[in-house]
Image: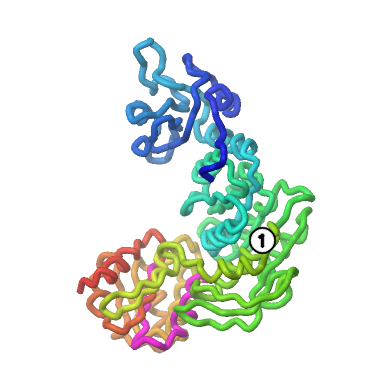
Amino acid sequence: MSNVQSLVLTADELTVAAEGRLVGRHSDVAITGFTIDSQRVRAGDLFFAIRGERLDGHRFVAEAIRHGASGAIVSDVSAVPIGASGEPAGITIVVPDTTEALQMIAQFIRRRSGARVVAITGSVGKTTTKELVAAFLETRYRVFRNEGNLNNHIGLPLSLLELRHCPEVAVVELGMNHVGEIRTLVRLAEPEVRVWTNVAEVHAAFFGSIDAIADAKAEILDGATADMHVVANAADHRVMARVAGFVGEVSTFSVDAGADVYATDVRDLGLDGSVLSIRTPVGDGVLHTPLVGEGNVANVLAAIAVALRFQVPLDRILARAATCEPQPHRGEIVRCADGLTIVDDSYNSNPKALECMLRSVGGDKRHQRRVAVLGEMLELGGRTTKLHRVCGRLVVETGFDLLVAVGGTAVEALVAGAREAGLAAAAVTICTTSAEAADITARIVKAGDLVLVKGSRGIRLDLVVDRLAAGEA
């Protein structure tokens, strides 16, 4: 996107967009970037003084300006240092609520950019699907995608601000753990194409049932018009029941027949990914993805459905799919010098994603032993114990020889399920912290072992991966 003219944004128009009040004499100053982090300011950035649960950005306005910020958006003008002229230093836009101002300016830039927006939600696979969609579209278009998990009421607006560089397509993911959050994000992003991957018991602590989760995810369909498009998982009945009322065009994907884009003859190659035949409205083909697990096959199919909507040739999609590697800590294969192999899926976990990974990794018989290092799955509410017990049984049923369980009381249910399924007491270790798990796992693994590391982000099992990869006993 370096050869494309970026938007030139002035304090005057951003003040109007934020419905704020401009203080001082800087109305014609051009703004080259935005930030909410005073320690990451680049010259010309406009600093948003966001009030969060733990920190108030107004405390850092002066620091941001010292680091080169062109000014700040504040709700308390006294936070802005006074310059030599006796007026606030730099651009100062005063608003009632700085988070709302961030969102309003983000929406303004999204509209000015002219980009078409693809928004992705679902309980499992959002980030991987986002990266795949972006990779396929990049074979034909200038594409922007939001980084990492910048997918909430602050992260998404920060991403939309980057559309000032005028990509042709923006691919963003929308996250949530409460009712109404997806609705807000859809309103800001105004996506022409919406993708709904699935519904699973994720963030169940905040919802009374899985159907309530589905209803919250269904906010991805809000505000649609007849010229908009949704890509939906035909194999998920909760998704399809809610998509039935969508006013625009619908296309579907599925690992099985009965969708617009679907797979046949799927061969799970374990750590080498999958090979499958695909059927699409524009032709058929053979696809190899190095991404591990059936869940990732569904993610690839969803991304293909989106790319076809944008008229990307199928042969170009299939060629690109074969080169798409997993994102950090999301199914990465780490082959260590001492002969140990690690499947690093430590970024997050939930019952559905864990089941898919256990089946794929446990089915790989090319290693001496299969070791599961599993962290507690958080935010499962009243079903925490039951779901952990079910997953414990799956550890054994899918062929793992050793289990290291990490976390609080919930992992006792995980261990109980494994023992009920026949795993010997000597093959199970319970750890309360990731540091303890790193020490113990480093001592028990051997050359030739295959180790799956997966847990909720708050458990920090990436520390286990780092220790094993470093080869420290």
Which residue is rendered at x = 54% and y = 51% of the image? 145
- Decide: few, some or many residues near mark 1? Use Cα within 10 Å; few <14, some 14-19, many ≥20: some
Asked if residue 410 can be seen in this view, the reply is no
- The image quarter containing residue 444 is bottom left
Pick whichever, 1 or 424, lies toward us. Answer: 1
Magenta stretch contains residue 362: yes
- Counting from the top left corner in percent of width and height, residue 452 is at 39, 75
- Counting from the top left corner in percent of width and height, residue 341 is at 34, 77
Q: Is residue 162 above or below residue 352?
A: above
- The image quarter containing residue 468 is bottom left
Q: Is residue 439 left or right of residue 93?
A: left
Which residue is rendered at x = 47% and y = 72% of the image? 354
Q: Which residues are magenta?
A: 352-376
How many circles with numbers are drawn on the protein? 1
Q: Is residue 237 above or below residue 166?
A: below
Which residue is rendered at x = 44% and y = 63% of the image? 348
Which structural element holds mark 1?
A: loop
Task: Please state, as top left, top right, bottom left or bottom right, where the C terminus lies in the image.
Answer: bottom left
Q: Is residue 233 above or below residue 87?
A: below
Pick whichever, 296 or 26, lies toward us. Answer: 26
- The image quarter containing residue 254 is bottom right
- Counting from the top left corner in percent of width and height, residue 369 is at 34, 86
Q: Which amino acid type corresponds to the residue marked 1 in the rendered image?
A: Val
- Counting from the top left corner in percent of width and height, residue 193 is at 68, 53
- Find disc 1 in the rendering and name its residue: 312
Asked if residue 430 can be seen in this view, the reply is yes
Pick whichever, 150 or 32, lies toward us. Answer: 32
